[in-house]
Image: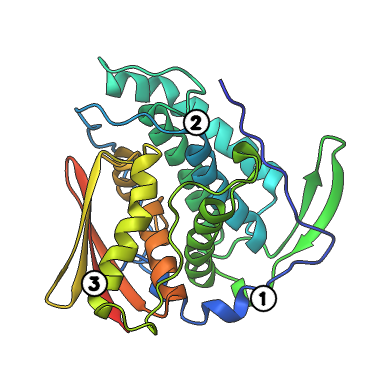
């Protein structure tokens, strides 16, 4: 079993928003089929879980994905991180038995991040909690709050940058940061990988060397990126192709296949679209702007990226 408790980096009335200039086009990182401005309506109904066995997740990737989202929440100062951890834990505990009944006869153990069934549930709990916080005060979470830091419980007062005052500004920024964080964890590693990079992470696409057609480079680059997810157990298989100028990505058996649908059924405005966030970031840093939509099926996530080179 693994206890997940990530350290907060917030400081007294300060925040580093070095990324702010990078996300002037933050809507590029959102799935276009999720409306962040519509009237919220909660639909408390879970869909059926996948009925097939998925791959075993590598612990390092599972933690990197969860931590990427956590760190983005912390960097934006969406809420006090001690509060977020408590509320996320409560969401997980309150829904745990119902989820176990839902997945029966498949089974999982509490804390087993290698099991995609458990990862699906903990990821759902993290994002369900985030959506509840983003929906406070009609989409205007508190700009200032007190946060307890570390085991000593030192209290700091934190103020969020006014650029990210409401849900409408926070969600695009969050989407960008999650993609950036995941890619950086893959590229640079962290403590669970002894600061060694994940195997096979591609460099950003170089369109200047003239060695191949640009469309081939895009497909090959995204394939290389998704191969990392596959190698570390996030999905069973994938396909990448270009059709009529659109990039089509079909990811079979991803570890968040149930939870992304469960979040949609709750009326979530931000979902755990790890592949989408990371691919959009990878393309963007390669000089390719994109907008994406996804369709969730019983077995896969199918993405369509409109490309703007």
**Is 11 situated left or right of 263 in this image?**
right
Q: Identify whether 77 is placed above or below 7.
A: below
Q: Which mark is residue 162?
A: 1
Q: Dot 1 surroundings within 10 Å: few (below 14), some, or many (20 or more)?
A: few
Q: Which residue is mark 2?
A: 92
Which of pointers 3 and 2 lies earlier in the amino acid sequence? 2
Q: Which of 286/256 is in front?
A: 286
Q: Position of residue 253 (x, y in %)?
A: 25, 39
Q: Dot 3 surroundings within 10 Å: few (below 14), some, or many (20 or more)?
A: few
Which of pointers 1 and 2 lies earlier in the amino acid sequence? 2
Q: Residue furthest front?
A: 211
Query: Residue at position x 40%, y 72% from top?
Result: 205
Q: Position of residue 235 (x, y in %)?
A: 30, 41
Query: Residue at position x 44%, y 17% from top?
Result: 109
Which of pointers 3 and 1 lies earlier in the amino acid sequence? 1
Q: Is residue 34 visible?
A: no
For the C terminus, the quadrant is: bottom left
Label 1, label 2: how many angstroms apart (C-alpha)?
Answer: 31 Å
Query: Residue at position x 19%, y 28% from top?
Result: 51
Q: Which mark is residue 216?
A: 3
Q: Nearer the viewer, mark 3 or mark 2?
A: 3
Q: Position of residue 279 (x, y in %)?
A: 37, 62
Instruction: Tell me if label 3 and label 2 are in contact, CB under 8 Å.
Output: no
Q: Residue furthest left?
A: 244
Instruction: Tell me if label 1 and label 2 are in contact, CB under 8 Å.
Output: no
Instruction: Tell me if label 3 and label 1 are in contact, CB under 8 Å.
Output: no
Q: Dot 2 surroundings within 10 Å: few (below 14), some, or many (20 or more)?
A: many
């Amino acid at each position: 079993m693994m206890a997940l408790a990530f350290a907060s980096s917030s400081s007294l009335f300060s925040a580093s928003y070095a990324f702010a200039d990078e996300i002037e086009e933050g809507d590029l990182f959102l799935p276009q089929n999720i409306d962040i401005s519509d009237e919220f309506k909660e639909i408390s109904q879970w869909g059926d879980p996948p009925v097939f066995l998925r791959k075993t997740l590598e612990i390092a990737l599972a933690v990197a994905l969860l931590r990427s989202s956590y760190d983005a929440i912390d960097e934006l100062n969406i809420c006090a991180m001690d509060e977020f951890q408590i509320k996320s834990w409560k969401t997980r505990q309150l829904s745990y038995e119902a989820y176990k009944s839902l997945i029966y006869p498949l089974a999982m153990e509490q804390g087993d991040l290698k099991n995609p069934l458990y990862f699906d549930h903990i990821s759902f709990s993290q994002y369900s909690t985030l959506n509840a916080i983003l929906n406070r005060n009609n989409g205007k979470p508190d700009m200032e709050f007190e946060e307890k830091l570390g085991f000593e419980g030192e209290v700091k007062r934190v103020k969020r940058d006014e650029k990210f005052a409401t849900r409408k500004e926070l969600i695009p920024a969050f989407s960008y940061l999650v993609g950036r964080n995941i890619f950086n964890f893959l590229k640079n590693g962290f403590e669970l990988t002894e600061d060694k990079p994940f195997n096979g992470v591609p460099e950003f696409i170089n369109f200047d060397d003239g060695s191949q057609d640009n469309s081939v480079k895009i497909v090959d680059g995204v394939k290389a990126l998704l191969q990392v997810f596959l190698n570390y157990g996030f999905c069973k298989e994938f396909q990448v192709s270009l059709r009529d100028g659109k990039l089509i990505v079909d990811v079979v058996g991803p570890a968040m296949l149930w939870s992304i649908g469960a979040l949609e059924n709750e009326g979530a405005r931000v979902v755990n679209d790890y592949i989408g966030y990371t691919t959009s970031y990878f393309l963007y840093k390669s000089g390719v702007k994109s907008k994406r939509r996804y369709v969730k099926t019983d077995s896969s996530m199918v993405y369509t990226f409109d490309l703007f080179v």
